[in-house]
Amino acid sequence: MSDAGRPRFEEPRLTTRQVRRRRVPRHVLAALPLAVAGLLSLLLSGNALRPFEQITTLQARMASKSDFFKDPEVQRLLLRHGIRVDIHRLGSRGIATQSLQGMDVVFPSGQPAAKLVLARQQRSVHSVRPFVTPLVLGTFRAYADTLVKAGVATPQPATDGGPTLYYDLDMPTFMGLLDGRADTTDQDRDGRPEGADTWNGIGYDNAGAHSNSGRVLVRTSNVCESNAAGAYLSLLAFVANRNSTPGTQNVDDPRLAQDAVTGLAARIKPLISLQGMWADEQADSYFSDLGESIAPISLIYEHQYLAHQLAHHDRHGKQDTSRVLLYPTPYALTEPQLISLTDQGDRLVRILEKDEELRDRAIELGFRVRFSGEDGTSERLNDHLRAHGIQVPVPNADQTKSYEPDLDVLERIIDHVGTCPPPVQDTP
């Protein structure tokens, strides 16, 4: 067969495909410098490996000072130490009188509750009192001005010439309004004294724009649960006892001493029991939009008011001049105490003692932070307030301090006023 008659087969041709490289999207290229900068920031701050580190969660029971540990900046600073705090909210005296099983730390807002907690411990505990805060009465300008006209309060001068945020309150005179009794023995047909102390009765409605025929009262939290209410009760008892600490008289005769305490508790009970015995946090209600309609005067801590003013100025560029503070004279100073119940709790106490950034943050939240074992340092707080356009409160020339009675005396007064349930005992 000739070549011409054979079928012809062509050699297969090898073809190559040109692969096009995908371009990196522009938005990825734009974000790359930011990602690199973020990585460098993490490396420099020592936080690059934070997601891979073990975080210890501490169980904590706290009262109003849980505001500090709920702050996002405080939480961030604690995470740098590998600690997260799980907060179980309860009033300070409730902390001291209920079971503490499963807790690593507790943070009662004052010394009476702290002493109750410490008395129950069977291990050597670590504790720290990082800051102090005065007990104050939050009110509204029209009510404060009414108390000024009634001779009960004195406005502090405002350095900028504007309306003041702070008033000094004469507690002995103020307690004369709280008792609801008139200065005359005449009574009306209902058996009530004529001219009993109501807001309108002391001139609240004189301006014509306001009216309130209700009693002059202070809205407090539950005296069986709250450190603030217990401290306020101590203040009332101190004043009613002629600026003397209850329980310091008749010490050589236990029967007379006990009778004196019981009689004192009976005298001040009407100043507390007629106020509703509210158990919720007073500051939340006071700073709400309906605060003035809820209560003319609320028992709060100074740091709560100052934190509100700082936040208000940041948001609106000015002070909240509708809400003002009454500083009682004599005054009551509360000392929150963080108490460790476990080895993990010890870590948190040591951190709070040594971390300067946490102390600085406490000042930014309105606390008077302790320095070098002093009772309290106010100058750094005052500087922070001035720098943020907030009026600085001025100490009253009368610096009489209300001292809390011994724990057993205070417990007798609280139990008499509040009819409190017995404390819960931890099982060993």
Image (cartoon, rainbow, N blue to C red):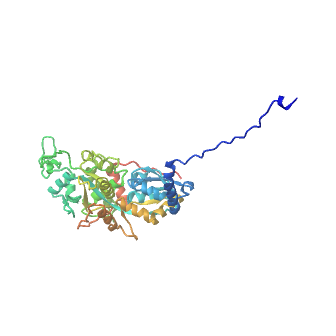
Image position, residue 327 (x, y; %): 25, 60
Q: Find residue 179 and report its horizontal and vertical position in percent.
A: 21, 51
Left or right position of 196 against 41: left
86 up-or-down from 362: above or below:
above
**Is any atom of residue 118 visible in this view?**
no
In the shown orientation, is residue 209 left or right of residue 134?
left
Tell me residue 320's x, y (percent).
26, 54
Asked whether 379 or 154 is in front, the reply is 379
Q: Residue furthest right?
A: 1
**Which residue is found at the position 26% from the left and 66% from the top?**
400
Residue 42 seen: yes
Front position in the image: 220 or 168: 168
From the image, which quarter does the N terminus lie in? top right
The answer to whether residue 259 is left or right of residue 127 is: left
State how many labels appear: 0
Coordinates of residue 388 in the picture (x, y in percent): 30, 61
Q: Is residue 130 left or right of residue 218?
A: right
Is residue 413 or residue 353 the one in the foreground? 353
> Which of the 4 image quarters holds residue 319?
bottom left
Quick check: 207 above or below 337?
A: above
